Image (cartoon, rainbow, N blue to C red):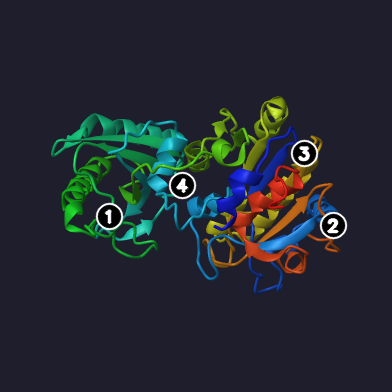
Amino acid sequence: MEIEKILPEIIEKNNKKILLIVLDGLGGLPNPNTGLTELETAKIPNLHNFAKKGTCGLTIPVLPGVTPGSGPAHLSLFGYDPVEHQIGRGVLETLGIGKHLDKEDLAIRGNFATIDENRIVTDRRAGRIATEENEKLVEIISENIKEIKGIKISIYTVKEHRCAIILKGKNLNPFLIENDPEKEGNPIRKIEPLSDDAKFTSEILEEFIKQVESILKNQQTKAKTILLRGFSKIPGIQTFEEKYLLKAACISSYPMYKGLSRLVGMDIIEGLETFHNRINALIDYYKNYDFFYFHYKKTDSAGEDGNFEKKVSVLEDFDEKLPDILKLKFEAIAITGDHSTPAVLKGHSWHPVPISIVSPNIMPDYIDTFTERTCGNGLLGTFHAINVIYLLLAASLKMKKFGA
């Protein structure tokens, strides 16, 4: 990005605070029965009032027409080029549960899944098994699989159906085809190398899956295999504080987002399983940080499940609690999403995401509702999400004049 060339000479530190609220998978598409999106359907007076006080627009998470994963979409919001910094989900998931990665380690994100006798995937999330059940299965697998071909293998519970796997040893390569078929009703894929150097790693993981399925076959659980995704090694990246002179904190209950935040050098506030805990953390740590990233996951989960009514409901739940967040004084507050997850598509999509920014240093526009269509008419227009952080820095008077 061009701004990064001049950022070191214009960025400056002050005591003004910034809050970035990310409603995961915020954007939606119209319900065929009503013609209204989830945001247009929900009763969200506080979000509408926020938009009325602020300046609105739409963000493009990565590039026009490109459907982003949560990692690239969040990197954009944090001001890092997601195309330049391609970070695998495995690294994010592993860091998110507080596991250390050495430079040569291979990190993998796993989903416990259900397959039939022909290895057809019937449920990619094994019915979203409880975290406690996940922990029991991970314990059994850990006891029985410790090493394959001299490579140490460790598996860890993340949350619900998700797990993380770390491979330690030499000659590990992440250039592999994932075994996730991405849709139910398709056979589980073979993990194949995308280069000759990855053949050794693919053989280890194919053997790992074979042994896992043998173990799970005899367990009373919907989890009968593991879909392996996000093969990755830890990259080098400039920290948030080095780049923006901001001491930053992550307020999230989900490991992947904590992992991404940890990767860019944010402090992770732990023990935040409930929304009430997260609001209290914002209050308790308010004096300690310049920048807070506040994450809300339920919008994305409902969208991925294709549950339009549930997404409407969780938007309304968030709206009820928003006034408690806004009691604190921030020089600039943005409310947006990392990407769109329309319930009608049951997954992430490329559609632009609503955003509203409130600051005494930004001119409000005439938008009075927080929806996809209305925000598209705001003064911010449609812009790349990577610029969100720079607008927040400017609104907080943290960037000096450029040039004479």
Circle 4 is placed at which residue position? 128
Q: Is residue 28 visible?
A: yes
Q: Which labelled disc corresponds to residue 232? A: none
Q: Amino acid at mark 2?
A: Pro
Residue 315 position, x and y percent, is 70, 52
- Compare marks 1 and 4 and give the one earlier in the sequence: 4
Q: How far apart are the alpha carbons under marks 3 and 2?
A: 16 Å
- Determine the secondary structure under disc 2: loop
Q: How far apart are the alpha carbons under marks 4 and 2?
A: 42 Å
In this rendering, position of residue 322 left or right of residue 265: right
Circle 2 is placed at which residue position? 364
Circle 1 is placed at which residue position? 175
Residue at 72% over, 34% down: 14
**Residue in the foreground of this view, choosing between 391 and 149:** 391
Q: Are marks 3 and 2 in contact (CB under 8 Å)?
A: no
Q: Are marks 2 and 1 in contact (CB under 8 Å)?
A: no
Q: How far apart are the alpha carbons under marks 3 and 1?
A: 43 Å
Q: Is residue 266 above or below residue 121?
A: above
Q: Which labelled disc corresponds to residue 330? A: 3
